[in-house]
Image (tube, rainbow, N blue to C red):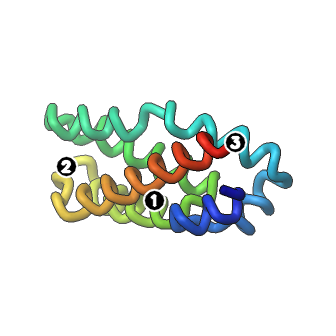
Amino acid sequence: MTLQECYATLCGNYEEAKTRLMNDSLIDRFIRRFPADPSMQLLRDKLQEGNLPEAFRAVHTLKGVAANLAFTRLQQDASALTELMRDQVTPADPQLVSALETSYRLVIDTLDAYIASH
């Protein structure tokens, strides 16, 4: 799987990633690190605990990481949840959380396939 195919599969924007990170080597290095990013698990944990300020912080971080890597669909879903929770009082909408989980799983599964192919 090429980087372009990887980005197409995970609903990202390879050209944006290339503009931001300058070359395929850097893109490869950073996307390989993404599965270790703790933001999604932290979001899950904090939502379960009912800690909305920390859940907001986690989803906001995930949104930023996704934006920096040009993981467009993940960034959009994280952004929707971030905006809903911006006041850190409004609980997360289960539909938005579900959409985010789906986007996140797509990214992780695609990156796993990409990494396995290299």
Which is closer to the viewer, label 2 or label 1? 1
Task: Give the label on residue 60, or none.
Answer: none
Q: Earlier in the sequence, mark 2 or mark 1?
A: 1
Judged from the image, the secondary structure of the residue bearing numbered disc 2 is loop
Q: Earlier in the sequence, mark 2 or mark 3?
A: 2
The answer to which image quadrant residue 5 occupies is: bottom right
Q: Quadrant of the N terminus?
A: bottom right
Q: Earlier in the sequence, mark 1 or mark 3?
A: 1
- Residue 116 lies, in percent from the top left, at 59, 40
Which is closer to the viewer, label 2 or label 3? 3
Q: Is residue 72 left or right of residue 22?
A: left
**CA neighbours of label 2 inside 10 A, class few (<14), some (14 to 19), many (20+):** few
Q: Are marks 1 and 3 in contact (CB under 8 Å)?
A: no
Spatial separation of the CA atoms under disc 2 and disc 1: 23 Å
Give the residue type that dot 2 points to: Val
Identify residue for label 3. 118
Give the residue type that dot 3 points to: His
Give the residue type that dot 1 points to: Leu
- Residue 95 lies, in percent from the top left, at 19, 64
Identify residue for label 1. 74
- Residue located at (39% from left, 59% from top): 103
- Residue located at (80% from left, 62% from top): 19
Spatial separation of the CA atoms under disc 2 and disc 3: 44 Å
Q: Quadrant of the C terminus?
A: top right
Identify residue for label 2. 89
**CA neighbours of label 3 inside 10 A, class few (<14), some (14 to 19), many (20+):** few
Which is closer to the viewer, label 1 or label 3? 3
